[in-house]
Image: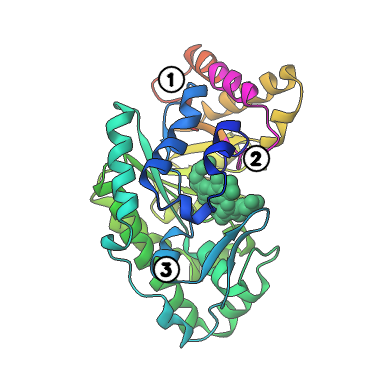
Amino acid sequence: MRQAGRSLPEYLRVREGISMLDSCTRPELITEITLQPLRRYDVDAAILFSDIVVPLRAVGVDVDIKAGIGPVVERPVRTSADLERLRALDPSDVPYVTEAVRMLVAELDGLPLIGFAGGPFTLASYLVEGGPSKNHDKTKALMYADPPLWHALLGRLADITISFLGVQVAAGASAVQLFDSWVGAVSPADYRRSVLPHTSRIFTALAGTGVPRIHFGVGTGELLGLMGEAGADVVGVDWRIPLDEAARRVGPGKALQGNLDAAVLLAPWDVIEERASEVIERGRLAEGHVFNLGHGVLPETDPDVLARLADLVHAESARGGRPEEVGQVVS
Ligand code: CP3
């Protein structure tokens, strides 16, 4: 999940004086930051240090990540003329990603590296709103008012995403995660009509690579079935819905990822232990389960608690169920 490393003193130290997006273009720094959580936590995979707006910046969009705010776009995308600024992404636009992934795969010695990209609705929201948004009103207004422009926008974003994920897989990433973090803002009918065709195209394009495809969004309880239909192998679930119910909604043939409430990690250890064990127990009812948080690590989380959690998940999942399928922990 995003920002697992943000609370670590060693992360803050190497980032000093370097902006977020600049740090995503330096292969040595990307490698170092990706490895930092692995030195502390006994997790079963690493997630590439990057951001969902990296490919947008790489094609020339005037996006920046402002500390404490998030991605901000100087000139929002709202007309068909604005679409011209969203050209296709060529692998040569992101040489630092290729280089970092190669370096990481060599360092990781068989531990899987998860690559990622932003989902079409979430990227569209940053572009249309011009920054973070609570209700995504302008984005949804465009979706309702001008379907041809909406589909043209999401089509271009899907092309960029296919290319960006392709770069990561070609360089050696062993799984990919599509973060459509804010897609929970739309109804199931609108998701099916306005988002799913594009997401589906992304997952279909990656099918031939053979790497597992993970699909995650926040507040997507009502969309889980459709998100599975879009073609991922694993559906990420936020903390709002128990995993056994999520498994019922997602349907057969998919694994789940999730879903401990990140805020639980601020409570005393006995509470954490009880809640994490409950997630594992419910996860046993799914066809496969990757243990994770329901969303990003909160910056005030004690790193020692995360280390203890990773150990707990390994111990609990070894205690019965289907250990070969459950209890993978991802940083
Ligand atoms: O932990 C990691 O380093 C994993 C890599 C990662 C980052 N962003 C680095 C990052 C991942 C997987 C992301 C994905 C991402 N970025 C998402 C999808 C995941 C989710 O949270 O749902 C989204 C929506 C973004 C956009 C974004 N980038 C936001 C909202 C912010 C927070 C801004 C803030 O300061 O509150 C960022 C910045 C960001 N991306 C940080 C990191 C480590 C923190 C910036 C910093 O350290 O200066």
Is residue 118 positioned above or below 293 on the image? below
User: How are the colours assigned in the image?
Assistant: rainbow
Q: Earlier in the sequence, mark 1 or mark 3?
A: 3
Residue under numbered circle 1: 322
Residue displayed at 39% across by 64% down? 58
The span from disc 2 to disc 1 (Cα, nearest Å) is 23 Å
- Residue 122 quadrant: bottom right
Q: Which residues are magenta?
A: 293-312
Q: Is residue 254 left or right of residue 122?
A: left
Judged by depth in the image, the label closer to the viewer, 1 or 3, is: 3
Q: Amino acid at mark 2?
A: Trp
The reply to whether residue 116 is visible in this rendering is yes
Residue under numbered circle 2: 239
Q: Earlier in the sequence, mark 2 or mark 3?
A: 3
Helix, strand, or loop for circle 2?
loop
Judged by depth in the image, the label closer to the viewer, 2 or 1, is: 2
Q: Amino acid at mark 3?
A: Leu
Q: Earlier in the sequence, mark 2 or mark 1?
A: 2
Residue under numbered circle 3: 157
Is residue 17 positioned above or below 320 on the image? below
Q: Position of residue 94 (x, y in %)?
A: 33, 58
